Image (cartoon, rainbow, N blue to C red):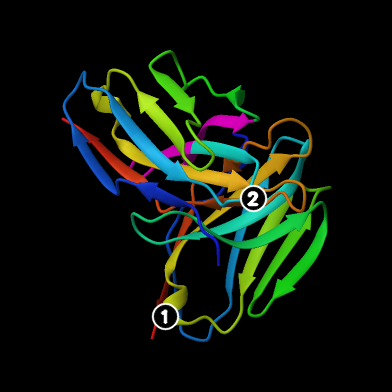
Amino acid sequence: QKEVEQDPGPLSVPEGAIVSLNCTYSNSAFQYFMWYRQYSRKGPELLMYTYSSGNKEDGRFTAQVDKSSKYISLFIRDSQPSDSATYLCAMSAIYGNNRLAFGKGNQVVVIP
Amino acid sequence: EPEVTQTPSHQVTQMGQEVILRCVPISNHLYFYWYRQILGQKVEFLVSFYNNEISEKSEIFDDQFSVERPDGSNFTLKIRSTKLEDSAMYFCASQDRLVSYEQYFGPGTRLTVT
C-alpha cells in the first residue's frame, strides 16, 4: 500500500463551484498535514497546515483531517480561475526529521 | 515576506558532470531539506539537514549526492557525476520547528542532464 494516495485525475469545475480534493494515507505516525498549491514548473506553495485531527478554515479554503479513517480533505469554496493549479497533499510524522510524504497531486481547472 | 530562494532556475549539464544547486533558506529557520520531482511524478524527499549534519536521507540520496551549508546562509546540493535519470526539478525547503512545523519551498531548479 502506498504511503500517501491521491487520485491524480484532473478536475474541471465551473467558476463559483466547490472543489473537493482528498488523500488517504497508511502511516499512522503522520500528525502534520499540509496542502500545497503548485503552478506548472514552480515550487509548492503552502496553503493549509493542520496538526492532528479536525478542521481548519482560511478564507475560501477548508482543510479536514480524519485520523481514524486516515483521510484528509481540502475544500475550495467559490472557486476562481486563479485557483487553477495542481494541489498536493503532504504529511509528516511528529517524531524524527519531518520528511514530507506527498501525494501525486490533483490538477484543478476552474472554467470562467 | 521571507522566502526560500534557489539558483540557478535552470541548469543544463552533460552526463557525468558535477552540478551544484544552491539554496538560501529563510533566515531564522533551522531545518533544511532537498526534494526532487521528476516530470509527472510525486515530489520525493532526498535529504534533511540540521545543525550541520544530515538528519535523514532517502534511498535516492546515494554516494553521488552530498549537501553542505558552507556559510550562514547558503545550503547546497551537489551531484558528483550526473546521470540522465537525475533530470528533475529540485526543491529546497526550510522549516523553523521552534514555532511551527510548516515547510516552505523554494521555486526550484530544473536540472536537465543530456
Q: Is residue B47 magenta?
A: yes
Q: Is residue B9 left or right of residue B57?
A: left
Q: Is residue B90 left or right of residue B9?
A: right
Q: Position of residue A3 (x, y in %)?
A: 63, 35
Answer above or below: position of A29 versus A36. above
How many numbered marks have been drawn onto this rendered protein structure?
2
Query: Which circle, 2 or 1, is nearer the viewer?
Result: 2
Q: Tag 2, which chain?
A: B
**Residue beneath the point at 45% across and 16% down:** B62
- Cα separation between marks 2 and 1: 35 Å
Query: In the rendered image, is residue A1 in sight?
Result: no
Which residue is more in the foreground, A78 or B33?
Answer: B33
**Residue beneath the point at 61% across and 80% down:** A77
The residue labelled by disc 2 is B28
Q: Residues within 10 Å of mark 2 (few under 14, many from 20)?
A: few
Answer above or below: position of A2 versus B39. above
The residue labelled by disc 1 is A81
Residue range in magenta is: B35-50
Which residue is more in the foreground, B17 or A60?
Answer: B17
Inspect the image, locate mark 1, and give the three-letter code of the amino acid beneath it.
Pro
Answer above or below: position of B42 versus A110. above
